[in-house]
Amino acid sequence: MSNEIRPFRIDIPQADIDDLNDRLARTRWGAPPPGDGWDGGVPAAFMKELAEYWRTGFDWRVQEARFNGFPQFVTEIDGYDVHFLHVRSDDPDALPVLLVHGWPNSFAEFADLIRPLTERGFHVVVPSTPGVGFSAAPRERTGWDASRVARMWAELMRRLGYDRYGVEGGDFGAYVAPEVAKAAPDAVVGVYVISGLGFPTEQDVPDMLPEEKEQYDLMQQWAGAEVLDHHHVNRIAPRTFAYGWDDSPVAALAWMTHKFNDFATGAFDAVDRDLFLANVALYWFTRSFGTASWPYRAQGGTMTWPEGQKNVPSGTYSGPPGIRRLAERTNEIVHWGEGNPGTHHFVAMEEPTAVAADMKLFFDKVR
């Protein structure tokens, strides 16, 4: 295995951009079911307008230049090329922090968060999960659980020369970030989770206080039968759906749009449309829609909430709908966010300044 760290720059061939626009222009629109609300999927009028904007209003080259403004690199870990951003602060006492993106997201999730963090005294490392974007796709069918990804990220931080650092994660990152602390407990100073600790289960209901039961009911509504279960799709049939996602940009866009709206009603009032489309385009150009599902296959048949860890202190940006009393069973909670601004599951895309400020509060407690 080579420890070489190679500079990387995004340069999507113009032919790929032209092909995307041609496919969008030739979309074969069917007749939608009656009604045009979100309860039957992405509304037709919304979908057509967004697809047309992707073709005629969105400028990939602008986003590419923006991403290339961050220093990017590739290195081989565990037999796989891993792509990552490494942005250093001017602060001589800066604390390195590893940001772990979620699904269906990429390093684009943190595009607006990186600078506020470096300005607050953090060196920032953002790796791309294997199978997402410019990181190599898994070759094995099994074994790609959060702990394996975490061990790769611990090795990445060691290779960068960081023997003391913090870790942040949300969504899939909420599973990976605690595992990094387990893999490198002497190096990680703290784990910061956007949301995802202390989530109640049915077994906790009998002992719940009334306000805790309200949080549980909210979770049941969010994860109920009316929500398209991406955990199930990604575990059971990612290959089947990936044929459509990798061939039709509108099929891929509809999937991403549906999930971002599931993660927060009114998602496109919260998340910048161009940043959302930049993330979709990254998946499209790198054919990541199917390969990004591998960590979900590794979870097995039943979806479980992240439990966290007790190796190092933990903090959250948003405690609810998690319950602190439950989180403290498996975590040393020293920072429990309540009332922080933001409505979207990917809050770093919506409120990057607030997230950076809250991360500073947490890591100042544990560094």
Image (cartoon, rainbow, N blue to C red):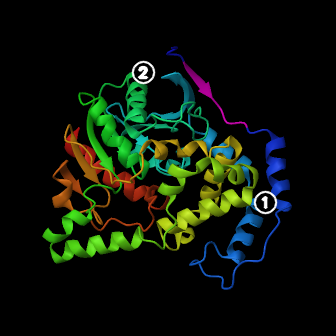
- At horizontal 18% and vertical 50% (from top left) the residue drawn is 334
- Crowding near the residue tagged with mark 1, few <14, some 14–19, many ≥20 C-alpha atoms within 10 Å: some
Q: Position of residue 95 (x, y in %)?
A: 33, 35
Q: Is residue 155 left or right of residue 290?
A: left
Quadrant (top left/top right/bottom left/bottom right) for the C terminus: top left
Q: Position of residue 281 (x, y in %)?
A: 68, 50
The local secondary structure at tag 2 comes to helix
- At horizontal 41% and vertical 46% (from top left) the residue drawn is 173
Q: Which mark is residue 159?
A: 2
* Residue 15: quadrant of the picture: top right
- Crowding near the residue tagged with mark 2, few <14, some 14–19, many ≥20 C-alpha atoms within 10 Å: some
Residue 90 visible in the current orientation: no
- At horizontal 30% and vertical 66% (from top left) the residue drawn is 321
Q: Which mark is residue 132?
A: none
Q: Is residue 126 magenta?
A: no
Is 46 located above or below residue 86 in the figure? below
Is 181 located above or below residue 218 in the figure? above
Query: Disc 1 designates what residue?
Result: 55
Q: Which residues are magenta?
A: 5-11
In the image, 142 versus 266, the foreground residue is: 142
The local secondary structure at tag 1 comes to helix
In the image, 104 versus 246, the foreground residue is: 246
Amino acid on which the number 1 mark rests in the picture: Arg
Q: Position of residue 224 (x, y in %)?
A: 42, 71
The mark nearer the N terminus, 1 or 2, is 1
Is 127 located above or below residue 5 in the figure? below
